[in-house]
Image (cartoon, rainbow, N blue to C red):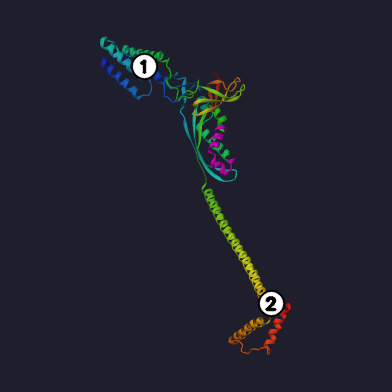
Amino acid sequence: MSAGLIFVIALLVFVAVTIAKGVRVVAQGEEWIVERLGKYHGTLKPGLNILIPYLDAVAYKLVTKDIILDVQEQEVITRDNAVILTNAIAFVKVTDPVKAVYGVTDFSEAIRNLIMTTLRSIVGEMELDEALSSRDKIKARLRESIADEAVDWGLTVKSVEIQDIKPSQSMQRAMEMQAAAERERKAAVTKAEGEKQAAILEAEARLESAKRDANAQVMLAEASAEAIRRVSVAVGNETTPMLYLLGEKYIASLEKLGQGGSSKVVVMPADLQETLRGLVGKLGGRG
Amino acid sequence: MSMEWWHWAVGGIALILLELVIPAFFVVWFGLGALLVALVALVADLSLTAQLVLWLLASVAMTVLWFKVFEHRRHKTLSGTAEGDVIGEVGLLVGAIEAYGRGKVRFQRPVLGADEWICLAETAIPAGERVRVVGIEGSFLRVTRA
């Protein structure tokens, strides 16, 4: 082989390698950071790009599509000392590739950690019930709080969504117990109220019946007073019918005494007529 | 060792096919160069060195030519790129900006996942003005009067 041929072959290899290293195809959705002798030189956009081999080197290849960041589940303590588990998902886009690679060592990890800590501090300022029911508020505050750091890292946080926000196992148990106790308390109160009501009603019933009994007695007394009054009016000053009536009753009661089994000794006044007259006389004296 | 014209032709076709496998846009020019050499070798009797030099020159010339033409390329879409197609978007300023201050801009359709953004500007712009996005800085948009 002649020297010329060898030189041409060497030249060919050199040119081929140079062109191979110098031509770069960047896919859509990616951007490459080029360093010239160790310093940032430029950013390669999607499409065909030419570098100067031996001088330039592609230092970083960045994805400029939206990045889905899964923020892992973590325990957060609320202001009222309840433990809740929460995780989130964030959509982040690299809007400044240079800041993203030179501003922070690993922007995905950085923003993930930032979201985790910020979420913890936001939820830590809330009461348990508030935290469980105000996702939108948490989302808005989260986006606001990480905005400043995101600028330094060349990232745009497009959205942060709270995936799960739930009380921890023990907290859930406690909440269930609390709910059960609340029900039991209500049941006890309801029962006691029922009993109270019943007692009151019973007492009222007793009161009512006593009132009626009293009324009845009064009416009975009035009726017998009226009866006596009518009898005494009917009798007037005549003593004979009076005597007759009393005598009849007297004899009837003697008969009853005689029939009774307990006592057989009956003491009878000797002068029946006088006894009755004495009674009537008193009555007559009054009437 | 002598190179027949068909050696060049087969080699050229092989190189062009290789382009499909190698994700770099340069092998195809060497393949086309080889085909050109095959064509020349068919009509003229050249030494191997001359053939190689011709191949080299043809390949490099075509590569350079392609890039001269390709230099004026246009991006068909900006979606997926860092700044995306947000730059140049016109929105309405709903919160006034003081000089070097922050305001609020609203867009007709959501931009980067939200239709309202906090924006920055170097000059004071009263609310109600139309503003144009000139840059994205994290969660803020840099705007100028449209």
Q: Which residues are magenta?
A: A124-144
Left or right, A239 with respect to A39, comes to right
- Can you say whether A224 is above or below A56 in the image? below
Q: Nearer the viewer, residue A153 or A200?
A: A200
Q: In which chain is the residue bearing label 1? A: A
Tell me if B129 is positioned left or right of A237 in this view: left
Q: Nearer the viewer, residue A253 or A277?
A: A277
Quadrant of the image containing the N terminus of chain A = top left
Q: Tell me, yes or no, whether the highlighted magenta stretch contains residue A141.
A: yes
Task: Find residue A12 and name its label.
Answer: 1
Q: Is residue A264 left or right of residue A93?
A: right
Q: Nearer the viewer, residue A284 or A96?
A: A284
Image depth: mark 2 or mark 1 in front: 2
- Location of residue B75 in the rendering, given as x and y in whole percent from the top left corner: 43, 19
Q: Pinpoint residue A28: horizontal percent, then vertical percent.
A: 42, 24
User: Which chain letter goes with mark 2?
Assistant: A
Identify the residue position indicated by label 2 in the image: A236
User: Does the segment drawn in magenta span residue A201?
Assistant: no
